[in-house]
Amino acid sequence: SMINPRKKGHSYELKIISELQRWFPDAVSTRSESKRLDDKGVDICYTGEFHIQCKAVEKLGSHHDILGRMPDDKIRLVVHKRNRKGETVTLYKDDFYRMLERWMQ
């Protein structure tokens, strides 16, 4: 049966939030916390220096568009899940290098 895409997206978001709470105990959906961030395409807040958008869709539009909508004051991530294809995280190369700079000291 077809799952309602909105419901599927929301439950995926909740799954990612529960996984992220290992590092960010306060992580929650922006839906309940920040209309401003929610309107800018950020799905999860209180995740330190990351803005995170979750997608559980087979056909994803442009990662560039999704990343570009989010405020650039933090590292922007798109967490994407496809059926039987696994899950990916996409970010700008500059942000990836910023993370390497910090971690590879």
Image: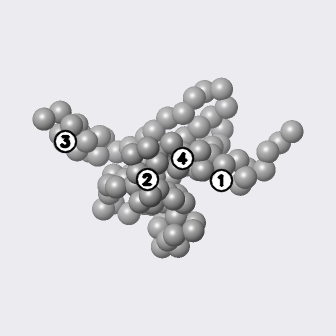
Which of the two discs, 1 and 4, sits closer to the camera?
A: 4
Circles 2 and 3: CB atoms closer than 8 Å:
no
Residue 79, percent from left and from top = 50, 43
Q: Which mark is residue 18?
A: 4
Give the CA separation, mark 2 to mark 3: 22 Å
Q: Which mark is residue 53?
A: none
Quick one: label 4, few (<14), some, or many (20+) residues within 10 Å?
A: some
**Residue at numbered disc 3:** 102
Identify the mark nearer the N-term, 3 or 1: 1
Identify the mark nearer the N-term, 2 or 3: 2
Residue 89, percent from left and from top = 45, 39
Identify the mark nearer the N-term, 1 or 4: 1
Q: Secondary structure at mark 4?
A: helix
Circles 3 and 4: CB atoms closer than 8 Å:
no
For the residue marked with disc 2, what is the amino acid? Answer: Pro
Q: Secondary structure at mark 3?
A: helix
Quick one: label 3, few (<14), some, or many (20+) residues within 10 Å?
A: few
